[in-house]
Each structure stands twice: as C-alpha cells, then as structure tokens.
Amino acid sequence: MKATQTLTTASALLCALPASVVALSKVETRNLDVAGDDASHQWRAINSGASCRLYIRIHHSSLINIFLISICSSATLLLYVYATPRPRQTVDFKDECLHKHKDECIAAINAKLAAYPELFEGREAFEFEVNKVREATDEGYNIVAMRLNVDETTVGGLLGDGMIWYPNPWCLAADNCYTVGPWDCDVGIPLLPEQCCKMIQDSVPHEDMNGKYLECYTEFPVGSPSNPVNPGRVCIHTDADGIVVHIPKNE
C-alpha cells in the first residue's frame, strides 16, 4: 500500500513538471525492491531528448527510496520522493515444520527459499541452528531460564511481560511432585537478574529428590547486543526424537 501511494505521488509530481521535462522517454515504476547490499546505491540517468535529465537514485533493500532531480536549461527543479525503508522481513515456518521431523523441516524451508527468494532478501542459503529443548531427564533440568530485555540489564520474560516459567514439575519424591512458577519479575519496574533469581529460589527452598535446587541462567533476546537480528539464521527447537516443537523463524 505504501509503495503504491508513493509511486502515485511520484507520478503526480512528474505530471506537474514543465512540458520539456515530461518528455522523458520512460520511467519504470515497478517495485524497486531489489536484492543487494544495504550500503550499495545505483544511479541511473534517463535522457528526455531535450536539455533535461532525470536522475534516479535507488537504495537497494529498501521498499523505495528515490531522489528525482530534473536539471533544465531554463530552471532547476528538485523533487524528493521517499518511502520508509522496509524492515527486514521475518517469516515463520509453521506449516513447513511444526510437529514434523527436523530433516523434513529443513528440506521444506530450503524449498521455500528456492521458490521465493524475494521473501528473504535474495539470499541463497540459511544457517540452521538445531537445539533440543531441555526435558525433565536432561542434565540441567533444574535450571530456570530468565529471558532478559533487549537492553540486557533487566528481566523481560519470553513475552516481554516479566513472567518467568519453569516447564517441569518439582519432585521432592517420585510420588510428591508439584508445579512451581510462574514468577513475575516485573513489579512495576523490571527486576535485575539477581533480584529475579532470588525471588524464584526463595519460593522453592527445598531440594528435589535428586538433591538439586533451582538455579538460574540468563538468555538474550533476538535483537539484543549479544544476540543481534540475523535474517539468515533459522533456529529449530526439537524434542529428543528430532520433532520440531516450536515454530521456527528466520531471525
């Protein structure tokens, strides 16, 4: 929609130019979103047959970013047409992957990339990160993951609401298990990781049947300095059988 509005505006401005300028041979107004380095630029000059030129500057990987400059013998006219650059697109692969084996998932993602490269900035391949989710029988089952906020200083939780969850029951004996959490680590202001972890551990003071206590570790959200956005990366989370349990995205 924004692209259409911008191109319409550009066309209207061109139509308002003096006749000597409107005599341009051709201006292509298709979607100018093309693959390329963000820092690269392309200059094109289109002769009008008169003493005017139309210079079009295309900023690659933006939706549209065009400068129109017409220089004539009788006058100089500057037009500026701009559309907000398109943010990098994140695509989820629910249909391709969820509840399917990781190998089938990866093959389906690669097929989608080959069929629709324009969805992925024209890239030729993805970097896949496959990780098994922690289960109650795994080493480190007693660790609570605290997702930080993007600034990496306070706890934000998976949904950004400060809520921290523990996926397993806490078992004092084989027949004595109960649910722990969730914990709200945003009490008007987000808590520091140390404060959040202390609250979690204070709420579950007893060791489990294996002699373990709850422990904490911090993880960094996508977009934070320690985990910057990477549209060429796809993270895949599986169970012990290699079945995808979360919806993968390129991020």
Image (spheres, rainbow, N blue to C red):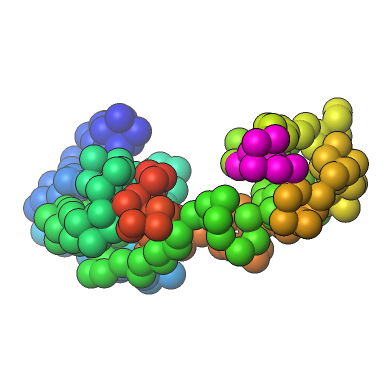
- Give the side of residue 62 with respect to residue 222, left or right: left
**Which stretch did the figure color magenta?**
168-176
- Give the side of residue 114 with respect to residue 77, left or right: left
Query: Where is residue 96 drawn, in percent x and y?
Result: 22, 46
- Give the side of residue 225 with respect to residue 205, left or right: left
Q: Is residue 240 magenta?
A: no
Q: Relative to residue 116, is residue 202 depicted above or below?
A: above
Viewer-proximal residue, 159 or 34? 159
Residue 188 visible? The answer is: yes
Query: Where is residue 106 drawn, in percent x and y?
Result: 25, 60
Q: Quadrant of residue 175?
A: top right
Query: Where is residue 134 drawn, in percent x and y?
Result: 54, 55
Viewer-proximal residue, 81 or 35? 35
Q: Relative to residue 93, is residue 60 depicted above or below?
A: below
Q: How many marks?
A: 0
Which residue occupies 29% across, 43% down? 99
The quarter of the rendered structure image containing the C terminus is: bottom left
Viewer-proximal residue, 249 or 140? 140
Residue 20 visible? The answer is: no
Which residue occupies 11% across, 51% down? 26
Query: Where is residue 87 drawn, in percent x and y?
Result: 44, 48
Q: Quadrant of residue 163?
A: top right
